[in-house]
Amino acid sequence: MVDHSVNAPQAAANVISEWVWYEGTDAILEGEAMCYNTDYGTAAAFDGKRGNRVERPTSSNNMAFAGVAATSYAARSTGQYIKIHCPGSKGVNIAIAAPTVINTGLLTFAVGGGTGPNGRFVKSGFPGRGTAIPRQTVAEGTGVLESDLIGTAWSLATDGVTLPVASTTGC
């Protein structure tokens, strides 16, 4: 049986973390989304590295959300090991590209350009892996905020801005 209780001071986040290899060479901001490189290696051959190598979100890996960077990392020309907080973590920081209101709506990581910087969380509101519930109000819409990497049974706003809570069951 796995014990996910917080065996630390009460102010500590309740996290599920792992160390993975980041293939990029750029700097990483704390809380940016990472996805597993599910097409690593030869497609017809088994390769366990597909489950421990991460890269920035793309349209081909966005269904394989791994978690968020546990801290900021400087650029490295050869890639580097990084610590990530995995889905199911509570009280972790995520990098945002939209203002938030505590316990209101869902934030989902952006892929590519479009609604926000790649790997930052925006008000898309899609439930499931790669979605976070804001646990802090942030007016300016940039930086990091406390969140829980979970989410089910929420409504997506038609205006794309206000995300009312339909249910908090399972949160």
Image (cartoon, grey):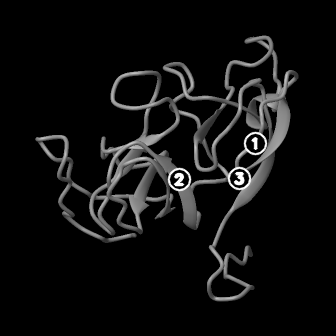
- Return the x and y of residue 61 as percentages of the image width and height: 57, 25
- Return the x and y of residue 95 as percentages of the image width and height: 52, 48
Residue 161 against residue 52 in the figure, above or below: below
Hey, which residue is sitting farthest left in the picture? 158
Could you classify mark 2 by the number of other residues whose Cα lies within 10 Å: few (under 14), some (14-19), or many (20 or more)? many
- The residue wearing badge 1 is 73
Q: What residue type is disc 2 on?
A: Ile
Q: Quadrant of residue 20?
A: top right
- Return the x and y of residue 25 as percentages of the image width and height: 77, 23
Answer whether labels 3 and 1 touch (C-beta < 8 Å). Answer: yes
- Return the x and y of residue 92 as percentages of the image width and height: 58, 63
Give the mark nearest the N terminus, 1 or 2: 1
Hey, which residue is sitting farthest front in the picture? 140
Residue 119 against residue 157 in the figure, above or below: above
Secondary structure state at the residue bearing disc 1: loop
Q: Give the Cα separation between the discs numbered 3 and 2.
A: 10 Å
Split into 4 quadrants, where in the image is the C terminus? bottom left
For the point 63% across and 88% down, which residue is it?
A: 10
Horizontally, residue 24 falls left or right of residue 109, namely right
Horizontally, residue 6 falls left or right of residue 41, namely left
- The residue wearing badge 2 is 94
Residue 134 against residue 46 in the figure, above or below: below
For the point 83% across and 25% down, which residue is it?
A: 47
Q: What residue type is disc 3 on?
A: Thr
Q: Give the Cα separation between the discs numbered 3 and 1.
A: 7 Å
Horizontally, residue 60 falls left or right of residue 164, namely right
Secondary structure state at the residue bearing disc 2: strand
| Mark number displayed over residue 71 | 3
